[in-house]
Amino acid sequence: MRIVILSETYSPQMGYSENVLPKYLARLGAEVHLLTTRLHPYYNLPDFHLIYESFVDSANNKYLSEGRDGYTIHYLKNSKVFGYTRMKGLYATLRELKPDIVQTFAAISWIPLEAALIKQLLGYKLFTGSHNTASTFLLAKRLDLKWDKDYIKCMLTRFIHGRFISLHTEKCYAVTVDCADIAKRFFGVQRNKVEIMHLGVDTDIFFPGNSEELVHERRELREKLGFAESDIVCIYTGKLTKAKNALILAEAIERLRAMDKPFLGVFIGDGVQREAIRTHPSCITLPFMPYRGLAPFYRAADIGVWPTDESTSMLDAAACGISIIVSDGIVYREHIEGNGLVFKMNDLDDLVRMLLMLYDRGERERLGTFGAKKMASYFSWDSVASRRVKDYEVALGYSSRS
């Protein structure tokens, strides 16, 4: 089976779907090609240069093919049409590769639209995705949409062409319940083609520190960071922006320190809140690092905290065996049920209360152990890729895998 995955952005330093899903599909015996551009994730953020410029590999500017983790990456040039990205040479590349399956991570935009049109000529089976959550797609939170100008604009610019794409696809994989709802209500995806299939964890990298070697690694890293074994270390990884509001975690830690509770914080990332976090004496900040390097830091910590919306880092941290705290601003919570707690978003008092609930080491370890087992059993990219391959085979008329 030859699978082509289309992704607008790509960075080898990230641990997103476009990085890890191809690896696990290739392990299942598929020939996998990733078609992408030289655009980096979040390139369209107004503060991209402030947050990511020092992190991304700006020297990688050649348009070529390269092998990685068992799959081939093809970098295509891109252009902007009406403000949205198109891949130049998409038809010629797909015609050359002759895929059986084409998978995109979006249900709307130029890339899935062109993939739907090219399908009529090349005959492959097309699958799309929906990763827009209610916490970031604000239109989904409005109660009365009947005469809402933004809703009408969405219907004209998103729903109509999204329905055309959907008519030519097999399935749309929504990664959460709210992503599924948005795909159906706002992006024109037919209800019978939406399937909820969560994101995965790269369990080659993210797993608990149960071995003697990893216990030693945890101890050494904590000592290097200035943490004692008796300290309760909270970790946050990601953008240090106002929207993510990691600063509230630093404030909660200082309040707990004032109560003589041994909480400390480590923040890995960059953004406008970085300097404010650094002013808190019980917190340290580290720059962005490739996702493969994050696992030792998760294993060295005790609690992972993400104060606002979703992050794939929640899954990675849980897989490393630490308990998790998230906000009630996220709709999808399967990844923290039984292994984490939920606080009222932007409520400092409530965050302090939740952290105190994890003051007991035995409780933290109980939740962390449960979470690691859950991630390995139900949230690994291996299991996600296996389910997708079965869908691909059904679409192609193959017999079921044994």
Image (cartoon, rainbow, N blue to C red):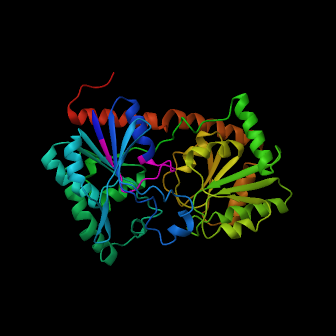
Residue with the most extreme left position: 121
Q: Where is residue 278 in the image (x, y as percent from the top left)?
A: 73, 66
Residue 158 point in image, percent of width and height: 28, 65
Q: Would you say the magenta stretch is mainly helix, strand or loop?
A: loop
Residue appearing at x 76%, y 34% in the figure? 216
Asked whether, in this view, residue 43 is left or right of residue 130, the answer is right
The residue sitting at 36% across, 73% down in the picture is: 144
Q: What stretch is highlighted in magenta?
A: 4-18
Q: Is residue 201 magenta?
A: no
Asked whether, in this view, residue 94 is left or right of residue 132, the answer is left
Quarter holding the N terminus is: top left
Is residue 6 one of those drawn in magenta?
yes
Indicate the quadrant containing the C terminus: top left, top right, bottom left or bottom right.
Answer: top left
Front-most of residues 304 and 40: 40
Give me the residue at 41% from left, 49% from top.
175
Q: In this view, does 150 lie to the left or right of 59?
A: left
Q: Which one is nearer the viewer's eye here, 352 or 39?
A: 39
Give coordinates of residue 139: x percent, y percent: 39, 69
Q: Using the rendered view, name the quadrant where residue 363 is placed.
A: top right
Answer whether residue 169 is visible to the viewer in this image: no
Q: Using the image as rendered, state which of residue 40 and residue 306 is in the foreground.
A: 40
Q: Which residue lies furthest to the top in this view?
A: 402
Q: Is residue 283 visible?
A: yes
User: Measuring 23% from the left and 28% from the top, which residue is drawn there?
Assistant: 398
